[in-house]
Image (cartoon, grey):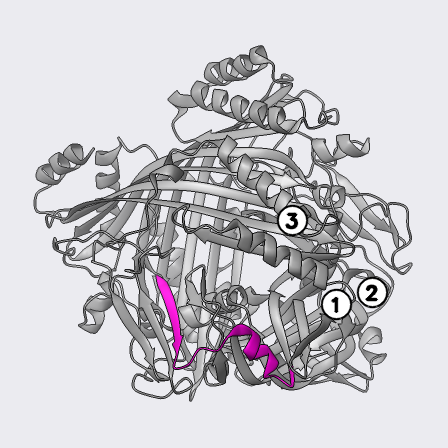
Amino acid sequence: MIEVIEKTIRKYKGVPLEFFGSSNKSMSIEMKMDKISSSEMSVSKGIGVKAIVGGRAGFSYNSDIYSVEDAVKSAMINAKHSELKQDSFPIAQKMKDIEGIYDYRIRSMNPEELVSLSVKLRDKLKERNNSLKVNDSVFEAGSSDDFLVNSNGVSYTSKYTGISGMVEAVYKNSSGGASMGAPTIKGFNIDYLSEKAARLAVSGVGRKKIRSGKQMVLIDSDVLESLFESTLYPSINADMVQKGQSTLKGKIGQQIGSSGFDIIDSGRIESGLCSSAFDRDGTKSQETSIMSSGILKGFIYDYVTAMCDGKKSTGNASGGFGSMASISPTNVLLKYSELMKFDNMISGIKDGIIIYEVLGAHTANHITGDFSLSINKGFKIIDGEVAYPVKNAMFAGNVFELLKSVSCFGDDVRQSGHLIAPTIAFSGQKIVG
Amino acid sequence: MDMQIKRALEAVMTKGAKYADIRSSDSSNTTITQKNGKIEDMTTGNSFAVGIRVLYKGSWGFASTNDMSSLLGVADTAFRIAKSIQAANNNKDIVLADAKTVDMTIEPNYKTNIQDVSIDERVGFIRDGYKGATGASPEIKSVQISYSDSYAKKIFANTEGSYITSSPQYFRYYVFSNARRGNRIEQSYDRCASFSGIDELMQKDPAKIAVSSSNKALMLLDAELPPSGMMSAILHPEVGGVFVHEAVGHASEGDHAQRESIFTSKLGEKLGSEKLNIVDDSTFFGKHGSYKYDDEGVRSKKTQIFKNGVLESYLHSRETAGFMGVASTGNCRAQSPEFMPIVRMSNTYFDKGDMEQDEMIEGVKKGIYMAGFKGGQVDTTGGTFTFAVEHGYLIENGKKTKLVKDCAMSSHILDVLKNIDGVGNKLYVDSLGYCGKDGQMVAVCDGGPYLRVNNILVGGQK
């Protein structure tokens, strides 16, 4: 394939071209009411071509990877209608692989192995409590082989794998969910899924109404990730900043978070769910400081937005073959000067709430950061003890105020989507009951 | 292509499958995105996908590819995985509800073929929009407009002899306006979309859509954050539609009801007030959630979910209908041939009642009027749901007063069904929504009249 592309590059000499190809294989197993109900397998591939004509870039794609030349011609026509300024593509750099993001065992996995994982999870739930049922569980495993070639001599290939599982367990009239993903089998922990789902389902019985008021709020990393997806991540995206759609515009060097609180974007974390040697533009991945001890340090860039600001790309171009690259965080690491044992964190709280699941995170205002979430799984903490599950309560606030309200970090660090963080306690948050 | 499809279906039946179906889509797509007056994304592309679903005794296997030449191999994979699940689980046989065999070509119902609209004309829709959006006020500082269209050739075929082809065309036109005053930035949007060709965009003035987007963003600059607590709410039809979708629609989907949904085993029970009448109607002409046949070849139909407060029917696929011994309601849909079809809503609405809008507001001492849909979510097992709106007004002593923004509310399904005490006398079913479930997005439409709901929890930041 690469030979065909190189031949095309020679044929269109003088037209800067970029080719991104991807070949994906994935399978999933679904269990409903304790029984495996279906299994899916999918194979897909395609190629995307960006062409620069007269300093403007156009794009075209095709799911038939052998239609390379047709895609080049379409991309060149599209460039003539485009006003996206771009002169060239990144130049070749020496790449270094990242450990723990590819597992040949996932690549060669068969559906039976996923079935046995799914059954194992069900059995582990029953071991914990025989009345627990799997209402729904989905296990997925997939691999992707990508290549990126451009007329500046870049010719990279990469392989990724991933495995994920989600479960909703039911106990009486209560349900409890858990999900996790990892690039390798080694990093995938089925005990985490069964323990969390069982604990939340069983302890979720007997929900009580609570009173409104400001209090300490502990947020699970799954909840924080879903909230950041619609608020913080768009705000640190250089494209949004340049277009005036981020409240963080013009705030570099200002205090925007609690002192001692760091936010780092890093595409180079070993075994990171969002790690890769290079990004969708062909820029080597790196570690970028977003916030250091509460002070805003920078934004995340791809090649085009970096050029626009006269900066270097931070390696945050993302996307598949069917669209032009767009900016996305890689692994987002939250750090705090001090970690506390999770149990000690709870025992130190007089009046608070711990939130494991919310509804409506996607409706948060991505510019102002205002949010209002329904607490679907939360527990009241009274005098250092988890007291009871809460009923019909909401959590309302602002993400940028949240960044300034960190009280402490737990020690239960894990990755949820982009976010690598523990349970975090935020003081003075508004709960509506 | 039809020979390859027929051969693949025959191959899995020969091996012992009970049923199989194949869906394929071959589409050409265009996306044009303009940011602050510059076309920053000009993309065209072609994509093909084919998926085969095989039923073996009590288990499903599904496989998809975008290489037609590998269809036989993919069909074999789907069969093998169904068989291996069955061997491991010994699932009880799945009974599919009967479906009529259909052999037809669905004729397109557009006047203008998208292929006859030049790229310059399509770019023109955006340029007109930009002029309209920025001309609304100097406080409009940033505008993003995106246009996308697609025309496809689609095939559905199953082992019962159905063979349905169609050639749908759709477009989407979205305008996002950002208004700025001092440090405050507010965003709003407006849009136009249709699965019946591009005529609607050509008839509606893109500039008017863009002005409406900007005016909404400007209005938000004056809005305050909402209060919190239990109160009465008057829901604009678009919001009422989302409310119906989240609070009733999802829990009535047969796959949820078959497992642990808040509506499981409650058919025939009176769960709400007399005023509760809810319908899902995929036959509604020209709406965003309309279709002729669902993704397992079942004719679209109108289904009464609630009648006078009584749960009358779930929404069904052939599988969930077969499980409950009823007929499919034609609600089995997939995002694309790369996904297994699942039970989905179509056009879901609250049927009209007899109250005037003013009458509803007059009856509220302390409450909130909610408009401008932002999104919603539901836990069909536990019964909690939420939805959020872009703006609203406080209602004090029967009158709309202060403008508020970013309001969200939450309640429990079984509680809220009893708390609807006002149903407007005019029906609006016009939304252009997308609904996400199990990782798949499908187009839907929600609506209804103005609704008044008591004792709902508003989660304001103020």
Q: Nearer the viewer, mark 1 or mark 3?
A: 3
Dot 1 amino acid type = Ser
- Which residue position holds label 1? B411
Residue that label 3 marks = A125
Q: Which residues are magenta?
A: A330-351
Q: CA distance from mark 1 to mark 3?
A: 30 Å
Q: Amino acid at mark 2?
A: Asp
Q: Quadrant of residue A427?
A: bottom right
Tag 1 secondary structure: strand
Where disc 3 sits, the SS reads helix
Residue at 55% from the left image edge and 42% from the top image edge: B196
Judge by depth and name the residue closer to the eye, B376 or A343.
A343
Residue B271, image x, y percentages = 88, 56
Q: Which residue is mark 2?
A: B415
The answer to whether residue B265 is left or right of residue B444 is right
In the image, residue B136 sits, relative to residue A119, either above or below, namely below
Q: Does B31 sit above or below residue B293?
A: below
Chain of the residue under label 2: B
Residue B117 visible in image: no
Along the line of sight, the residue nearer the viewer: B115 or B184: B184
Q: Are marks 2 and 1 on the same chain?
A: yes
- Amino acid on which the number 3 mark rests in the picture: Leu
Dot 1: few (<14), some (14–19), or many (≥20) neighbours within 10 Å? many
Q: Crowding near pointer 3: few (<14 within 10 Å), some, many (20+)? A: many
